[in-house]
Amino acid sequence: MSTQSDLAAASPPLPPETARATETGAGALQNFLQLGAHQLVADEPGALGGGGTGPGPYDLLAAALATCTSMTVRLFARRKDWPLEQVSVLVAHSKTALPPGPDGAPQAGSRDRFEVAVTLTGPLDDAQRQRLMDIANHCPVHRTLAAGSDVIVSPAG
């Protein structure tokens, strides 16, 4: 398998909003990840069979939601010229059991849950804070997760 530096040297930047994961061979699950022109290593923690050398897939998904929420709030506050000094977003991902079915019987499987905590710093009034919290609920990644997505897997080439 290739090393991370070999993969980086041999991989031209991808178009925006495109990602590629390629196994590095370093550890059981480590991948070299390209996100447009950006590069990083992804992995799973040891408890899940990886080496813990980078964020895992759900870490990256939580990071996407946190980042999008922060950016959406910032852009809105800037457009309104509100005194938002800093926004910080913490996202925790977990899986919860499905509720009982219509007949009351337990359902197999789980549902993903993302808990988003937004901290707004600055001399905002109560109405501004409330409006920014409303806006935080409407970032594009939040809307994508809430609506669901079509995922089509096919062979490359």
Image (tube, rainbow, N blue to C red):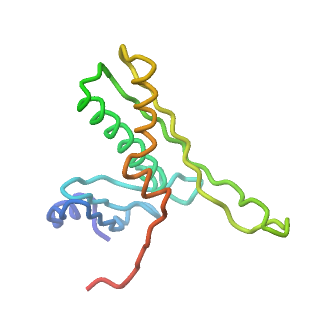
In the displayed structure, 66 sits above or below 22; it is above
In the displayed structure, 46 sits above or below 6; it is above
Q: For the C terminus, which image quadrant? A: bottom left
Q: On the picture, is 114 further left or further right than 155?
A: right
Whole-percent x, y for residue 140 in the image: 37, 51
**Looking at the image, which residue is at 69% across and 66% down?**
109
**Which is more toward the observer, 143 or 96?**
143
**Looking at the image, which residue is at 35% across and 35% down?**
73
Q: On the picture, is 51 further left or further right than 85?
A: right
**Which is more toward the observer, 75 or 15?**
75
**Which is more toward the observer, 13 or 83?**
83
**Which is more toward the observer, 67 or 72?**
72
Q: Residue 8 appears in which quarter of the rendering?
A: bottom left
Give the farthest residue toward the front. 127
Q: For the N terminus, which image quadrant? A: bottom left
Whole-percent x, y for residue 50 in the image: 50, 58
**Looking at the image, which residue is at 41% across and 42% down?**
66
**Looking at the image, which residue is at 28% across and 62% down?**
3
